[in-house]
Amino acid sequence: MIYSMTGFGRGEAESDKAKFIVEIKTVNHRFLDTSFKLPQYAYSLEERMLHVLKEKIGRGKVDINLTIKSKRKSQKTYVYDNEAAEYFVKAKNCACEEFSLNDNFGVAELFRMPGVIVEENEDYNPDELWEFVSLALDSAINQLLESRSNEGMRLRDDLILKTDRLNELASLLEERAPKIVDEYRSRLREKVSELIDEENIDENRLCEEVVVYSDKICIDEEIVRLRSHASEMRDTLDCDEPIGRKMDFISQELNRESNTILSKSTDTYTADIGIELKTLIEKIREQVQNLE
C-alpha cells in the first residue's frame, strides 16, 4: 500500500466527565517530525501518543491536537495559585531593589502573570485520561491512514502515466538517433564537395569525422539507463512498503540522465524531446516528495 505524507484524521471518545477529540494533520517531511498541542494537565500523555504514532507513520510533519471538553453544566471556574503569585512578587521585589525601579506592580498586573489565575480542570489521573485519549487517537490515526492511502493511490496513478510517457520519449530518441548521424554525414559531404571535387574526397577521412561525431552525440547508454530507472520506478510503485526515499533516489538518477541527453542534443527535435523529458522528470521529483 502506497501512502502519501499528506492527510488528516479526526477521532472522538467520551467519558462521563468529558469529550475527547484528537485531530492529526500531516504534510511531507524528510523525517518523522511531530508537534503536540495538549492541555497542560495531559502533557504526560505525549510520550504514549508518540509511541502509537511511530507504529503507524514512518515519516512526515505531524501535528497532533488534543481537545478535552468538560461535560460540566456550570461555567468555567478559575483558581488562584498562591505559589505562582509568590514567585512573581519576589521576583518583582528583587528587580526593584537591584535596579532602583519604581514599584507600580499591582493586583491587576499580578493576575496577568502566567499561572497565577488558572482554569480549574477535572481531576484526571494519567491512566484515566489515556483510556479515552487512546480511543480517540486510534480513530484519528485510522482516518488519517485512509486519507493518506487515497492520496497515495492518486499519486501512484499519476506516476504510472508519467513513467509511461518517459518510455515513449525514450523510444522517440532511439528512433531519432541514427538519423542525426546520417544527416551529419550528408551535410559534411556537401560542405566538403563545395571546397573540392567529389572525386577527390577522402572517404576514410570522412568516415573518421562521422565516427567521432557519432561517438560525441551517442546517447545509447543514457537511454538504456533511462529505461532501466523507469522500469525500477514502475516496479517500486507496486511495493507494500514505504517507497518515498527510494523513489526520490530513482528520480535523481533520471534527472542525471536527462541532463546528459539534453547536453548532447545537436538538433531542435532532440532538444525539444530533451526539454520535455527534463520537465517530466521534474514533475516526477515533485510528486515523489509526497510519498512516505
Image: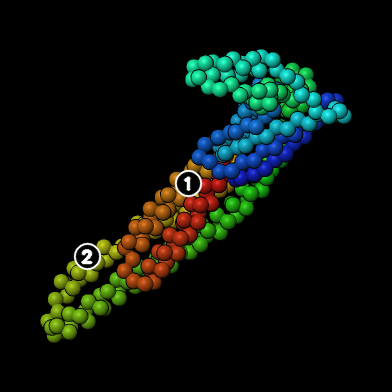
**Relative to residue 59, is residue 114 depicted above or below?**
above
Q: Nearer the viewer, residue 163 or 235?
A: 163
Quarter holding the C terminus is top right
x then y, percent, for residue 110: 66, 23
Q: Is residue 266 left or right of residue 121?
A: left
* Residue furthest to the right: 73
* Residue 126 visible in the displayed image: yes
Q: Secondary structure at mark 1?
A: helix
Position of 124 with respect to 193 (left or right) is right
Assign a secondary structure to mark 2: helix
Query: Where in the figure is residue 277, as x and y percent of width and height?
Result: 44, 61
Point out the tag, 1 or 2, that comes first from the N-terminus: 2
Name the residue: 59% across, 41% down: 240
Q: For the point 52% across and 49% down, which residue is it?
A: 288
Among the 4 quarters of the image, the one containing residue 185: bottom left
Specify few, some or many for label 2: CA neighbours under 10 Å numbering under 14, 14-19, or 20 or more.
few
Observer able to see residue 55: no
Q: Nearer the viewer, residue 130 or 98?
A: 98
Q: Amino acid at mark 1?
A: Asp
Name the spot of residue 124 as percent of width and height, x first. 76, 19
Which of the image's four quarters has the N terminus? Answer: top right
Question: Alpha-carbon neighbours of circle 1 within 10 Å: few (<14), some, or many (≥20)?
Answer: many
Which of 279/247 is in front?
279
Marks 1 and 2, how far apart in space? 36 Å
- In the image, which disc is placed on residue 212? 2
Under mark 2, the amino acid is Val
Colour mapping used in the image = rainbow
Disc 1 target residue = 248
Task: Please identify the quarter of the rendering in which residue 62 is found.
Answer: top right
Of badges 1 and 2, the one in the foreground is 1
The answer to whether mark 1 and mark 2 are in CB contact below 8 A is no
